[in-house]
Image (cartoon, rainbow, N blue to C red):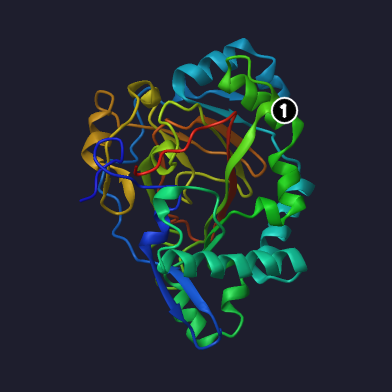
Amino acid sequence: RRCHRWNMTTLGDDADFTSVHVTTTPNTNHATAFDVPKPPPPPGVYALREDARKLANRVDTFDDAADSDDALNALHDLGYLAVERALDEQSVQTCLDELAVMARGEQDLAKKFLERVGEVREAVSEGRIHVSDGGDHEALQYEAFAETKAETEADALKDLANVRKLQGFVRHSPTLAALAYRRDVLELVAKAIGGGVRADDLQIHQSLALLKPPPPSGAEQGGREKPFHQDLAYFSIEPHTKIIGAWFALDDTDEKNGCMHFIPRGHQRGIWRHESIRDWQIDDADVLEASDGDGGPCVSVPLRRGGAVIFNGLSPHGTPPNVSASSTRRAVQFHYHAGARRITDE
């Protein structure tokens, strides 16, 4: 097992590069990255605390959150804050349409994104980019089950339903950059960081689209679990840097299709030990030790399409696999800071 980098070694922003299967499929002329199948999470890891309802921290809009001392105090205390109406329906659909364009490489900027995906993958394989160096490197990764589809379906890899993750797209997509730099989002993030930070001080550290398709025919689960982790554990920056994440739901999300789950106040413990188990993750035993009485360790944050959750970069969180009958769970996520010093192996 490889331990958390502040204990022994380094993970890096792109640790997920190390858990993929790269191959050239019959219907493509380039190397393609597929996720590696993972075992299901152990029982109880996503069980809810007895007091989960009391720990729901929700407001209606970003402006409401920025104007509410109670909501901001709860964000600092619990580590997360749900925003019920973050995006309107048109904004949600625009994001989904743009993600599909990026995955298919249909426009010039999207083509450049796919070119950069290949260049980054080649640089990683040749050791010219090290995963521990960090950065919002371009990446496109497909679900494990998509590899079989790609062998027989010519357009399988152009279908967003087979994509697990897109990363590093903000510089290639003015549409998605507009969401990342929305003023109401930045104002709330700046207040969450505190210390006199202003919206204009913020930088985007990482951009991600995290997609959990429903199970394919005959399968028990679709998009796989992302085990409990702290986002700061993937970032090669000083561990005390204040990072805030903004996660936007592009579908209705719930416990069955993989909504966000948090360990309340887990960020107050500082750095948790991370190991290589099903992913770079917090050990399941440590998660279960956070259980409350006869309840489980966590709080779920189901959201309607267009909702969002803002959270501390040290907040332990995870998402279970999509085991719904037909529900897709798509989301985009951005991480912000107001300046950070990178850590190197030296």
The residue sitting at 48% across, 60% down in the picture is 325
Which of 257 and 11 lies nearest the eye of the viewer? 11
Q: Residue 250 in the image: state x and y as whole percent.
A: 64, 49
Tell me the residue that label 1 is attached to: 200
Which of 95 and 201 lies nearest the eye of the viewer? 201
Q: Residue 139 in the image: state x and y as whole percent.
A: 54, 61
Badge 1 element = helix
Q: Does residue 61 appear in the picture of this structure?
A: no
The residue sitting at 62% across, 68% down in the picture is 114
- Quadrant for the C terminus, please: top left
Quadrant of residue 159 in the image?
Answer: bottom right
Quadrant of residue 127 in the image?
Answer: bottom left
Which of 19 and 216 lies nearest the eye of the viewer? 19
Q: Is residue 259 left or right of residue 89?
A: left
The residue sitting at 30% across, 32% down in the picture is 272
Q: Is residue 104 above or below residue 64?
A: below
Q: Residue 233 in the image: state x and y as whole percent.
A: 38, 39
Picture mark count: 1
The residue sitting at 65% across, 64% down in the picture is 113
Of all residues, the one furthest to the front in this rendering is 346
Q: Residue 111 in the image: state x and y as whole percent.
A: 69, 70
Q: Does residue 154 appear in the picture of this structure?
A: yes
Mark 1 neighbour class, 10 Å CA radius: few under 14, some 14 to 19, many 20 or more: few
Q: Is residue 262 above or below residue 249?
A: above
Of all residues, the one furthest to the right in this rendering is 90
Quadrant of residue 124 in the image?
Answer: bottom left
Of all residues, the one furthest to the top in this rendering is 69
Residue type at tag 1: Asp
